[in-house]
Image (cartoon, rainbow, N blue to C red):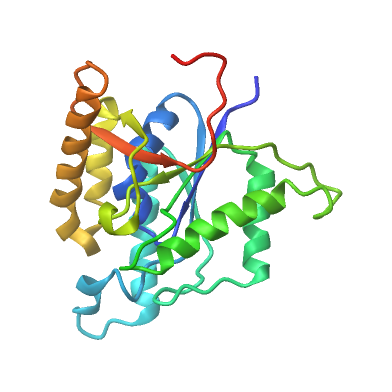
Amino acid sequence: MKQKTALVISAHSADFVWRAGGAIALYAKRGWNVHVLCLSFGERGESAKLWKRQNMTLEGVKQARRQESEHAAGILGASVSFLDCGDYPLRVDDQALFKIVDLYRGLDPGFVLTHSFKDPYNFDHPLANRLALEARIIAQAHGHNPQQEVIGAPPVFLFEPHQSEQCDWKPQLFLDISSVWEAKHRAFQSMQAQEHLWEYYTRVGLQRGAQASRNSGRKIDYAEAFQCVYPRVADDLL
């Protein structure tokens, strides 16, 4: 049987850990091949702690963030790759876009996780969203590199932004990640450059767990929330 796959498109090298680390660990535990694509290392806007070190360089920050991200992905059970498209600002040309398309076609993901449509605090995040959706559409086009197999229509779920209300993001799906919470929390600790976020996203996990319990009648300690991009197709309502 062909191994099931999933794709996570992360603007920066740590975004996937805070926002989707539970989903990644859960599906990796189920035997899925989960791949994370980081469009940048978050080297300018999300690495303040590293820049406070004496004689730090841009390449030094990138290398440190790469190592953190690879370590976190390993804890979660995922593979990870990087496009190094810059940070603050993130800029992606067609050549990079087509690399994402190639990744879609090579992986043929069962689902995709990425950022929200809007984020007035970080323009890199909605750009990652647009790239994820645009690459998905191109990967479905028979006329793009017609020697390759096209993909189907993988559902896309938007993970929770840092300030959801300001991003017009609404939770539509709660995923119980209680069984893999310890792995996600250990992955947090790989992100030494953003230690200030460890406690914040622990609280988010607990809050979403409480909301998931209230909406299901189940005992759920930790959860992640997602917004659906496309209509979900099912054989029944349960």
Q: Residue at x 24, y 78 (%)?
A: 51
* Whether residue 39 can be seen here: no
Residue found at the very far bottom of the displayed protein:
55
Q: Residue at x 18, y 27 (%)?
A: 221
Residue 136 placement (x, y as % from top left): 63, 49
Q: Residue at x 44, y 24 (%)?
A: 30
Is residue 227 toward the left or the right of residue 191 in the image? right
* Whether residue 221 can be seen here: yes
Quadrant where the C terminus is found in the figure: top left
Quadrant where the N terminus is found in the figure: top right
232 or 60, which lies in front?
A: 232
Q: Residue at x 41, y 62 (%)?
A: 125
74 or 113, which lies in front?
A: 113
- Quarter of the image for residue 183 reads top left
Is residue 150 toward the left or the right of residue 53 in the image? right
Q: Is residue 238 above or below residue 49?
A: above
Residue 143 placement (x, y as % from top left): 84, 53
Q: Is residue 178 above or below residue 8?
A: above
Q: Is residue 54 above or below residue 33?
A: below
- Quarter of the image for residue 25 reads top left
